[in-house]
Amino acid sequence: MKIIVYCQHVLGVGHFFRTLEIVKALDAHDILLVTGGDQLPAMLPGHVRQVQLPGLMMDEGFNGLYSVDPDKRVADVKKERQQILERLFLAERPDLFLVELYPFGRKAFRFELDPVLSLIAGDPALDCRVVCSLRDILVEKKNADAYETRVVDTLNQWFDALLIHSDPRLIRLDTSFSRIDDIRAPIKYTGFVTPLPDPATVARVRPDLGIGPDQFLVVVSAGGGTVGAPLLRAAIRAHGLLPDRDRVRMIVLTGPYMDKRSADRLYALAGTGVRVEPFWKDFISLLSTADLSISMAGYNTSMNLVAAGTPSLVWPFDQNREQRMRAVALADFADITLLDEESLEPKVLAGIIRERLAGGRKQIRQRLDLGGAGAVLNWIEENGRP
């Protein structure tokens, strides 16, 4: 089956890496992965052909798009992208179009998605099913009624199915979207999408890093790095206040999108026992061998934490409700402690780190469904064409 997968990340990296995990599972099919954000340090599997559209990203305040290429105007990039996408569908004639997030998000990319969806609907020769790939929680909108009406109308007009990457025992879509009953397309909860740690690989991480059995490993991360620098600075300063800091190794991951000034500040703050890196290729293995994680509470990181079983301190991004809702819900399913603004005071954070390292790993009674990528594969093979 030929499948075109569309994924546009605009600020962080979570949407891209969740989609990457899904396309890895579709290894028996011909996959074209259409991406449109800034380039990321990720290796694609051999069965995936990438179509990189001219890059567009969103500014930190979510006020508007900007061109990754500073020599190109946004209007010109939009026109070029729309033409590339339409030509791609006419040339490849896929059996299925998997669209990440839209129409629940990425309204700013209607300029290229709606024409393609209209093309598919209006050309019987294309014979292509259209499926939405959606995470667990939606970002709140200022005009919720107008937003939900637009989403429902778009889904009902053009989409054949909605795949929600969540375990409904934890989070159902109707917790952040009130009109789910108005969606006519079939809805399937797939379970959460995350890589799973390989025990043999995990066992090699600490020896490779030179971390002894009497030492602790703390991993500090901030996703893509566009936000989260205050958390990383607080963690590095807290490390310097630990009475047994010689036994605590800390790896701090800035993320590929952290601005140079903030990243340079972190490198300057790092003392003995603290290693700062922009990115870690096998993050799930690193996380699985850690004694403690300190991070934001985005979808990917949260599910990585569940998969790894690592005790964690999470600082939810407060610009929208998504991360806090997820972190609170996960308290019964994972070894997670929420941090607030006061917790970022280095002395306070150092005390929390000492307490969590001394406490070991909490016994988790309920297990989440983390088989989302495999469930997407199964659904496509049962319901896609041919």
Image (cartoon, helix red, strand yellow):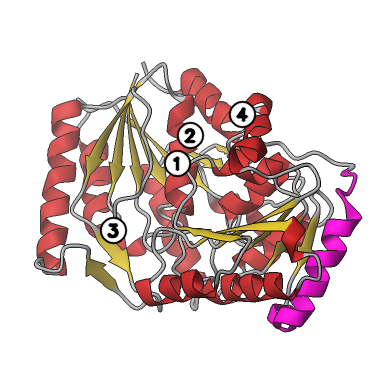
**Circles 4, 1 touching at the beta carbon (< 8 Å):** no
- Which residue is drawn at the image coordinates 40% and 52% (left, top)? 102
Does residue 191 show up?
A: no
Q: Is residue 119 left or right of residue 195?
A: left
Does residue 8 show up?
A: yes
Name the disc covering residue 19, or none.
1
| Place of residue 56 in the rendered image (x, y in percent of width and height, measured from the top left) | 25, 61
Q: CA separation, marks 2 and 1?
A: 5 Å
Q: Amino acid at mark 4?
A: Thr
Q: Earlier in the sequence, mark 4 or mark 1?
A: 1
Q: Between residues 319 and 133, which one lies in front from this camera angle? A: 319
Residue 259 falls within the magenta-colored stretch: no
Magenta residues (range)? 341-364
Q: CA separation, marks 3 and 4?
A: 42 Å
Foreground: disc 3 or disc 4: 4
Q: Amino acid at mark 1?
A: Thr
